[in-house]
Image (cartoon, helix red, strand yellow):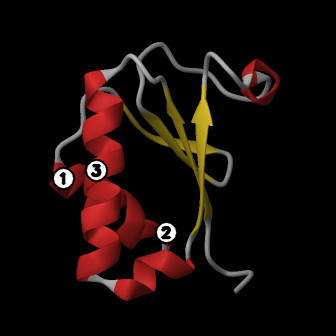
Amino acid sequence: KSWMKKIRMFKAAWCPHCNNASKWLEELFEENPKYKELDIQKIDIDEEKEKLVDVDFYYVPTFYADNKKVFEGAPTKEIVKKVLDDAL
């Protein structure tokens, strides 16, 4: 589905907001199977530094849709859902 946006979630293992966002992603996948069709990459900023070259952020988690930053900071489940909805 080439029209769907690619989502990159930049996260860190030590970040409680990242862990919440990951948990909400799983819940949203269960609530709406259509979200599972999205291309979502979870990128650990400490372990995958080579993937940080084309992005600009200060806080994690940060969500990019294609090459555009769509959210940075402490999300709610509603914000995570909006990121997914906008990418569909």
Classify 10 Å Cα crowding around label 1: few (below 14), some (14-19), many (20 and above): some
Q: Residue at x 36, y 47 (%)?
A: 22
Q: Is residue 82 visible?
A: no
Residue where numbered disc 2 is placed: 87
Left or right of 77, for residue 8: right
Name the residue at 25% across, 65% down: 27
Quarter of the image containing the N terminus?
Answer: bottom right
Q: Earlier in the sequence, mark 3 or mark 2?
A: 3
Q: Position of residue 71 (x, y in %)?
A: 39, 39
User: Mark 3 or 2, which is nearer the eye?
Assistant: 3
Characterize the local packing of mark 3: few (<14), some (14-19) or many (20 or more) Cα atoms within 10 angstroms.
Answer: few
Amino acid on which disc 3 is placed: Lys
Q: Nearer the viewer, mark 2 or mark 1?
A: 1
Earlier in the chain: of badge 1 and badge 3, it is 3
Nearest to the observer: residue 13 or residue 4: 13
Residue 20 % position (x, y): 25, 40
Which residue type does callout 1 highlight? Answer: Lys
Q: CA distance from mark 3 to mark 2?
A: 19 Å
| In the displayed structure image, the side of residue 50 where residue 7 appears, left or right | left
CB within 8 Å, label 3 to label 2? no
What residue is pinned by disc 3? 23
Element carrying mark 2: helix
